Amino acid sequence: MNIAVTIFLVIGAFFTFVGALGVLRMPDVFGRLQASTCIATLGTINIMIAGILYAASSHMSAGVIVKLILFGLLVILTNPVSNHALCKAAYHMGIRPAKGFEPDDYAEDFAEAGEAEDEVKEEA
Amino acid sequence: MTALLIGAIIYVILDFALLYRIFKGPTAADRMCAADALDLTTATALVMYSLYTGRAIYLDVGLVVALLGFVGTVFVSRYLEGRI
Amino acid sequence: MNKNRFTDWLSTFILCFLFWMLLVFSVQPREIILGIVVSAVIAMVACKLLIHESAFYLYNPVRIVLLLFYAVCIFLIELIKANIAMARIVLSPGLEGYKPGVIRIRGAKNIKSLYGLNMVSNSITLTPGTITMEVAEDEQGDNYYYVQWASVEETDREKAGEIIKGRMENWIGRIWR
């Protein structure tokens, strides 16, 4: 059982390492957001599974296992909301990648939003 | 089990990498993105430490840290978007 | 109308109280009384936000079983594939394959409810490499997702939708019909 716990811990730590390295290396905000999703998904789920196995094998109380499941569920449910809000805020602040977005359908269909931002900046 | 303690230490070391991005990041959105990831890694490290010591209070602390990080990120991104 | 609001409140109250009992995990009377008071207050505020269809729409057992099956068998495989693709981009020396773009993909016709739209966009956001920025509806009643994609492989919108959504949307259409 200890070997299974260690394997899950190693996989989780690897994906968290990938996420943190992506946050350091990516050239702009959008790439960093994409990389930080790795931390929230497989990084947390694997630690949760390892914790459940460890708590079940070392006879901890059932409340610990329920709390671990709730922790994983909470991270999985709340992370997409904050990522979506932060991505939209970065887009509306006027941040673009170095080469620009290759197809940019959002700017075509919601053109008034981008123009309004530009006018505000000119006035300021 | 020592593997849990080593995992918690690795997560804290990764926290310092994210902290570097918070200090350096060119825009506010970069800093907030790194801070959101830092919340998650800190909460996970607390969960592993609570399993290592066997004290359930750290598990509650980890849950609350994860929840408050979510609320803070949503509020700051609303502010950056100009809705508040 | 008044009765309708009460069943909304009751269904939200049951959900909140279940969550409280799982989090506290003891059956002492003072915990139970405190939980009843807190979840009654929260349910008064949150019932308008949570309930859109009939009040006990969420408690269908077939739907819960399908939801668990979707989360474990379908979504987890997509998640692992996307994570490995993201790891390959990050660990490559010069960040090869990082080409950001915002693309518009069309949603399926049978997903109309807010729960279904929310779940499709959250599933897209949760796979590393894609983030949903906006969900919009046009005059014909079709729903469009604006997805920010980290490595654009396909600029044709129909094929891009196939790649991004994969098998997830079929199953979500089966859950929230």
Image (spheres, rainbow, N blue to C red):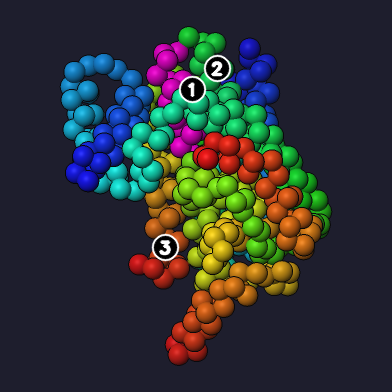
Residue type indicated by callout 1 = Leu
Q: Residues within 10 Å of mark 3 (few under 14, many from 20)?
A: some
Residue type indicated by callout 3 = Arg
Q: Chain of mark 1?
A: B
What residue does disc 1 label? B51
What residue does disc 2 label? A54
Work out whether C22 lies above or below C123: above
- The CA distance from mark 1 to mark 2 is 8 Å
- Seen from the viewer's position, the closer of residues A3 and A69 is A69
Using the rendered image of the protein, determine whether residue A67 is visible from the camera's viewpoint.
yes
Question: Does mark 2 fall on the same chain as mark 3?
Answer: no
The mark lying in front, picked from 3 and 2, is 3
- Seen from the viewer's position, the closer of residues C114 and A99 is C114
Residue sitting at 30 percent across and 30 percent down?
A: C14
Count of labels in the image: 3
Residue sitting at 33 percent across and 37 percent down?
A: C55
Residue type indicated by callout 2 = Tyr
Q: Looking at the rendered structure, which numbered label has been put on residue C57?
A: none
* Segment tinted magenta in the rendering: A60-75
Magenta-drawn stretch, dominant element (helix, strand or loop): helix
Q: Chain of mark 2?
A: A
- As for residue A67 lying within the magenta part, the answer is yes
Q: Residues within 10 Å of mark 2 (few under 14, many from 20)?
A: many
What residue does disc 3 label? B78
Left or right: residue A8 compared with residue B56: right
The mark lying in front, picked from 1 and 2, is 2
- The CA distance from mark 3 to mark 2 is 40 Å
Q: Are marks 3 and 2 in contact (CB under 8 Å)?
A: no
- The spot of residue A97 in percent (x, y) is 67, 69
Using the rendered image of the protein, determine whether residue A80 is visible from the camera's viewpoint.
no
Disc 2 element? helix
Q: Are marks 1 and 2 in contact (CB under 8 Å)?
A: yes
